[in-house]
Image: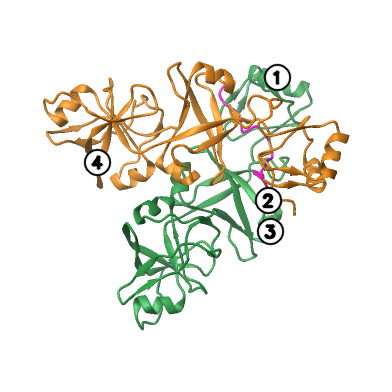
Chain colours: A orange, B green
Amino acid sequence: MALITEKFLRNIMAQQKLSKEFLLQEGDKLTPSAKDFLMDRKISIVQPGSSESAPHLRLTIPVGVSNRHVHLTEKHFHVLFGETEGVTELRPLSQPGQFAARETVTIVGPSGVIRNVRILGPFRGLTQVEISRTDGFTLGIHPQVRLSGSIDGTPGITLVGPEGAVTLQEGLIVAKNHVHMSGADAQRFDVKHGDSLMLGSEERRVIFQDVIVRVKDSYILDFHVDQDEANAAGLSTGDRVVVLGKNRRFYSPYLGVLPDG
Amino acid sequence: MALITEKFLRNIMAQQKLSKEFLLQEGDKLTPSAKDFLMDRKISIVQPGSSESAPHLRLTIPVGVSNRHVHLTEKHFHVLFGETEGVTELRPLSQPGQFAARETVTIVGPSGVIRNVRILGPFRGLTQVEISRTDGFTLGIHPQVRLSGSIDGTPGITLVGPEGAVTLQEGLIVAKNHVHMSGADAQRFDVKHGDSLMLGSEERRVIFQDVIVRVKDSYILDFHVDQDEANAAGLSTGDRVVVLGKNRRFYSPYLGVLPDG
């Protein structure tokens, strides 16, 4: 992304020791004197995407943006929709077996209502409603950020369908961002289930510094964020974020270069 | 935020050299053996907020969340509101002389309308409309992220007031996040006008990695984000973010501690 000059490298060195590898990013160019400067100090110059680069360098993960949605128990579905056959699939989601249903509900909070909230299938053992913090202002209710499935002590909410309504005692969350990956991907990223990744968006320059890793062999690699996070980071489904570190430690303190000046 | 054990420190050391100072964060506790471990290695233990800590360590900046708003030229104001005396002040903003006006306008895009959009005063030389990316979906128009005042080539939008309407040819932006600070603050933070800061929210663990510094002696220290950024980071006006680095380089690759386990 930039022309890297000797002066720029000297500026970095004035503030920190350079590591044994100098990692170029896509589009970076070194001036001849900058190249000599690195070679004199026996610092290897690593090309972007090079096989010499460490496994974590410039690895990226595709983004999936989740809009507000509801997971239902079979029982709650039938309260809301009556004695129908069950949910019907509108389209599959990124994770195998998961789908967006044709059916939607209205969610009702103390100060507002959100219509056409998509049900995701298949049925689950607990009903859970995932909204953004923005939606919380519409509804007048401000749930905590939680990993899916962790609904202990969260607020309730009312769901309304064409045939009935359900008032939950708990189950309303803002979803904690997380990455799904297979065991093979976990090896490639050098992480295990429960680790925390640091992922950077280059579009609007935000880093998600505590993204929980969920590993299962059937999982497809996908970084799940909600609509607020996507908007703040300028991300859309299918964009990619860069892996910058894990467990609250960056692989490098140095996030690419700014033009020299 | 955590109990720091000897095992935890050894884990860090296995991956990187500890610096000469070990910086405690608010609420961190060292076990006796962890304390001995550091003292044996002549690593000083720096208490949070201690005068011994380096100038940049644990410096924080208060957050100001900007909702969508409009800056108007005097001429456009009179088209929208007729021959009145001018804007009237509802309440002052954080920067001296700036205020939220009682008057609001409706902004109209190709696929939607947003009502009650606040005018900020005083009048400016150019009319500019600042919305969030979320608002862009409502309006059906997706402006670039730009610093205030930099509206060249941005999309236009229609503003409607009680007495008339204005269709701008350009001036619709998503505001780039930035920090206002005085010259004295710039010294304290060791930055200059135009530098880029890396600021972390501890609430929802997001880092804004390219926050532009704007220095002027009359400025009050304030980090301006829009509603999407605030929601993604779990921030409200008056919260504080931590300074983690500048010009794309972190002061430390290590962002505090996770509980040992």
**Badge number at residue B184:** 3
Are labels 3 and 4 on one chain? no
B153 relative to A219 in the view: left or right = right
Marks 1 and 2: which is nearer the front? 1
Give the residue type that dot 1 points to.
Answer: Ala
Q: Chain of mark 2?
A: B
- Measured in 3D between alpha carbons, the distance from the residue under mark 4 to the one under mark 2, in whole angstroms, is 48 Å
Q: Quadrant of the N terminus of chain B?
A: top right
Question: Which residue is the site of mark 4?
Answer: A116
Give the residue type that dot 4 points to.
Answer: Asn
Where residue A258 sits: x, y (%)?
A: 69, 48
* Local secondary structure at mark 2: helix
Question: Which residue is the site of mark 1?
Answer: B14
Marks 4 and 2: which is nearer the front? 4
Residue extent of the magenta highlight: B245-261
Are labels 3 and 2 on one chain? yes
Q: Chain of mark 1?
A: B
Q: Is residue B15 above or below residue B68?
A: above
Q: Chain of mark 4?
A: A
